[in-house]
Amino acid sequence: MDSRKLIPYSVYLPIEHHTKLKAIAQTRKASELIRNAIQTLLDGNDAYNSGYNQGLKDAIDVVLSNDEAMSVSIKDKKIGVKIADDLKTLERSK
């Protein structure tokens, strides 16, 4: 990549992300890693959406298998089911 065509861009990170990124930076791969992640997101790469959606499915499974969440109801609807339904609305398409 031609460094003359790169424009600096600043982001705010949680301290734990910053710490891990600094460790990666020691091998001079942090900028490339961030550029690739941003490019993947901007391209709408199906791998990103697929991973995101899989994370949602895993979270839904955890909620639905939680005994406490499934034992409490409000207005005749189990809290676990309500939370799972809300999580489903976050699913991303291409």
Image (cartoon, grey):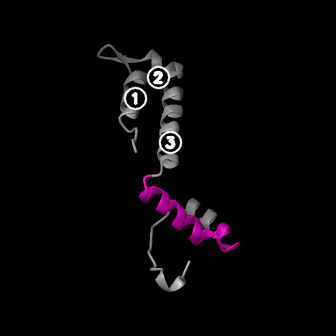
**Above/below status of 78 relative to 12:** above
Q: Are marks 1 and 2 in contact (CB under 8 Å)?
A: yes
**Above/below status of 78 relative to 45:** above
| Closest to the observer, 41 or 70 | 41
Give the foreground label among 1 and 2.
1
Q: Is residue 24 magenta?
A: yes
Give the CA separation, mark 2 to mark 3: 26 Å
**Above/below status of 9 relative to 36:** below
**Who comes first in sequence, dot 2 or dot 3?**
3
The rendered magenta stretch, by its main secondary structure, is classed as helix
Give the CA separation, mark 1 to mark 2: 9 Å
Report the amino acid beneath label 2. Answer: Ala
| Closest to the observer, 35 or 75 | 35
Label 3: few (<14), some or many (≥20) within 10 Å?
A: some
**In the rendered image, which quarter contains the C terminus?**
top left
| Closest to the observer, 57 or 72 | 57
Label 1: few (<14), some or many (≥20) within 10 Å?
A: some
Report the amino acid beneath label 1. Answer: Ile
**Who comes first in sequence, dot 1 or dot 3?**
3
Magenta stretch in the rendered image: 23-44
- Residue visible at 54% across and 33% down? 58
Element class at badge 3: helix
Report the amino acid beneath label 3. Answer: Ser
Label of residue 50 in the image: 3
Name the residue carrying label 1. 83
- Residue visible at 45% across and 69% down? 11
Element class at badge 2: helix
**Who comes first in sequence, dot 1 or dot 2?**
2
Q: Is residue 76 left or right of residue 61?
A: left
**In the rendered image, which quarter contains the N terminus?**
bottom right
